[in-house]
Image (cartoon, grey):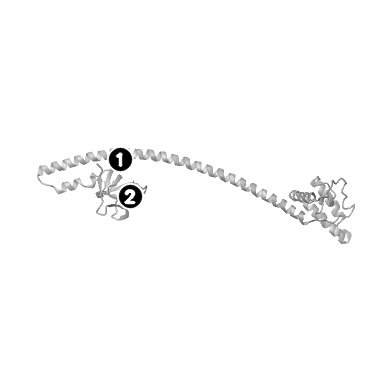
């Protein structure tokens, strides 16, 4: 491998300014145009340019130093070099000698540098991703905790209100039934209109009911309180349900069975009976 420091006639600890000055001096001396295109000067001029382009660039200079040290450390007969190296204008440049082992060592060094670079990049990226994931998980957990507290307070308040409403509904129903019986006894005749009034949707109030379906033992959901269109979803009979709202004789429920399956929709109040 060529000794670029020797070619430029400088030391290994020379500065960039020293490299530039040496290059200017030698490039003028060995310029082929000033030497009638002599082949010797052309070869020397090319070596001077290669040496300058390598050593003037900091990254290229570091890689070159590693390669050069690896090659010369592998030589068994290498001894301390105490003599001053002569400049290119003082003596001819010796031919470069390289071996397969030195090339392999150089390639291994370059490959090791590349591997270390990518490992450091991967480590930095993985650390950043881990921090981001932990932050997102913490924020999600905080939101879930807050949502759980709000939902618990909301349903506790709703259950208390519906329980009070159910009690009021039972009192109203008892009063209505008493009035109907009084009218029947007074006229000594069963008045169907009065009985129908007691079964009108006005007597339905939000509260707890029991499903009382048809012969198939199923109570089906409806699309809306203003539609007679029945859905495929249903609830089995003898299930406890909580009616939250009643419109046009249809009650809105939010039901979860024993298997954890949730059903939301409208039921016909005629398919329900008040839970005793």
Work out which quarter of the rendered image holds the N terminus and state it.
bottom right
SS state under label 1: helix
Tag 1 or tag 2, which sits nearer the N-term?
1
Residue that sits furthest to the right in the current view: 90
Q: Residue at x 69, y 50 (%)?
A: 112
Please name whichever residue, 214 or 180, is drawn nearer the observer in this view of the structure. 214
Work out which quarter of the rendered image holds the C terminus and state it.
top left
Residue 13 picture location, percent across and down: 80, 45
Q: Visible in this render: residue 112?
A: yes
SS state under label 2: strand
Please name whichever residue, 243 or 193, is drawn nearer the observer in this view of the structure. 243
Q: Quadrant of residue 29?
A: bottom right
Side of 149 where 265 appears, left or right: left
Label 2 crowding class (10 Å Cα cut-off): few <14, some 14-19, many 20+? some
Q: On the image, numbered disc 1 is attached to which residue? A: 162
Side of 11 where 130 appears, left or right: left
Gap in Å between the C-alphas at discs 2 and 1?
18 Å
Residue 170 picture location, percent across and down: 23, 40
Side of 10 where 129 appears, left or right: left
Q: On the image, numbered disc 2 is attached to which residue? A: 265
Please name whichever residue, 110 or 227, is drawn nearer the observer in this view of the structure. 110
Q: Visible in this render: residue 206?
A: no
């Amino acid at each position: 491998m060529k000794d670029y420091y020797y070619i430029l006639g400088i030391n290994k600890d020379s500065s960039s300014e020293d490299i530039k000055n040496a290059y200017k001096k030698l490039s003028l001396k060995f310029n082929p145009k000033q030497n009638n295109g002599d082949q010797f000067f052309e070869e020397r001029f090319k070596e001077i340019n290669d040496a300058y382009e390598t050593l003037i660039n900091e990254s290229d200079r570091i890689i070159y130093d590693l390669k050069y040290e690896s090659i010369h450390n592998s030589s068994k007969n290498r001894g301390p070099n105490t003599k001053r190296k002569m400049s290119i204008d003082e003596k001819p440049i010796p031919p470069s000698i390289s071996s397969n082992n030195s090339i392999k060592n150089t390639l291994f060094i370059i490959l090791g540098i590349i591997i270390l670079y990518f490992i450091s990049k991967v480590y930095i990226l993985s650390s950043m991703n881990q921090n981001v994931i932990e932050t997102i998980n913490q924020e999600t957990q905080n939101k879930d905790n807050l949502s759980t507290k709000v939902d618990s307070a909301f349903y506790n308040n709703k259950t208390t209100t519906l329980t009070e409403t159910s009690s009021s509904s039972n009192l109203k129903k008892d009063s209505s039934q008493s009035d109907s019986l009084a009218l029947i006894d007074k006229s000594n005749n069963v008045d169907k209109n009065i009985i129908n009034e007691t079964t009108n949707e006005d007597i339905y109030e939000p509260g707890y009911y029991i499903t009382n379906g048809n012969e198939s033992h199923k109570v089906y959901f409806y699309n809306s309180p203003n539609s007679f269109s029945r859905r495929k979803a249903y609830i089995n009979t003898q299930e406890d349900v909580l009616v939250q709202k009643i419109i046009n004789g249809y009650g809105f429920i939010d039901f979860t069975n024993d298997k954890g399956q949730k059903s939301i929709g409208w039921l016909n109040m005629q398919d329900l009976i008040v839970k005793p």
